């Protein structure tokens, strides 16, 4: 599971984590039955407080995306409504568009040209793909799950 935290973002860290895990669940990157990293492991990996991850997992459980099993871990649940998933995924994409527009706006204010912004985007895409390929960790069920610290 690939999660990236933007420390300077106006979006709270817990929201960033929750939206990214939700997107992984809705897009099928995380399949029903997949286990999420333990609270401590994810908190350490992301450099956040354990309570932040607990709150995120609890909210996702309340939404019906994951199930927290005491002593076993947190697992992705099957998604019941395909149309509901599409709506949630559409909301995630709209949020991404708003964030992307804000980044472009900031870049322009900093004096970057369209060419420089495109180059930054291209480099970010290449870096992310390389990170995703290099950070595959085998799950107990032998299903690969991708992780990133975001640092």
Image (cartoon, rainbow, N blue to C red):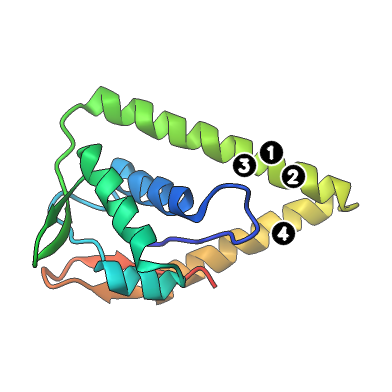
Whether tag 2 and tag 1 are in contact, CB under 8 A, the answer is: yes
Quadrant, the N terminus: bottom left
- The answer to whether residue 114 of the structure is visible from this angle is no
Instruction: Say if residue 38 shows up in the picture.
Output: yes
In the picture as drawn, the residue positioned furthest to the front comes out as 51
Query: How packed is label 1: few (under 14 Cα within 10 Å), some, or many (20 or more)?
Result: few
Would you call the spot at circle 4 few (<14 residues within 10 Å), some (14-19), or many (20 or more)? few
Residue behind mark 2: 104
For the point 46% across and 72% down, which residue is it? 47
Q: Which residue is mark 1?
A: 101
Badge 2 density bin: few <14, some 14–19, many ≥20, Cα 10 Å: some
Classify 38 as above or below 91: below
The residue shown at (35%, 51%) is 21
In the rendered image, which residue does mark 4 sit on? 120
Outermost residue on the right side: it is 111
What's the CA distance linking mark 1 and mark 4? 14 Å
Q: Is residue 37 above or below residue 57?
A: below
Where residue 42 sits in the image (x, y, percent)? 34, 69
Q: CA distance from mark 2 to mark 4?
A: 10 Å
Is label 1 in a helix, a strand or a loop?
Answer: helix
């Amino acid at each position: 599971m690939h999660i990236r935290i933007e420390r300077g973002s106006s979006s709270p860290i817990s929201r960033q984590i929750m939206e990214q895990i939700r997107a992984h669940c809705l897009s099928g990157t995380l399949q029903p039955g997949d286990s999420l990293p333990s609270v401590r492991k994810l908190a350490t990996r992301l450099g956040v407080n354990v309570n932040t991850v607990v709150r995120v997992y609890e909210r996702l459980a309340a939404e019906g995306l994951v199930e927290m099993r005491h002593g076993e871990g947190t697992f992705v649940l099957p998604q019941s409504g395909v149309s509901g998933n599409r709506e949630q995924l559409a909301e995630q994409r709209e949020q991404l568009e708003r964030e992307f527009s804000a980044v472009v706006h900031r870049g322009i204010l900093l004096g970057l040209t369209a060419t420089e912004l495109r180059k930054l985007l291209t480099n970010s895409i290449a870096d992310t793909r390389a990170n995703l390929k290099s950070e595959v960790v085998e799950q107990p069920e032998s299903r690969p799950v991708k992780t990133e610290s975001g640092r």
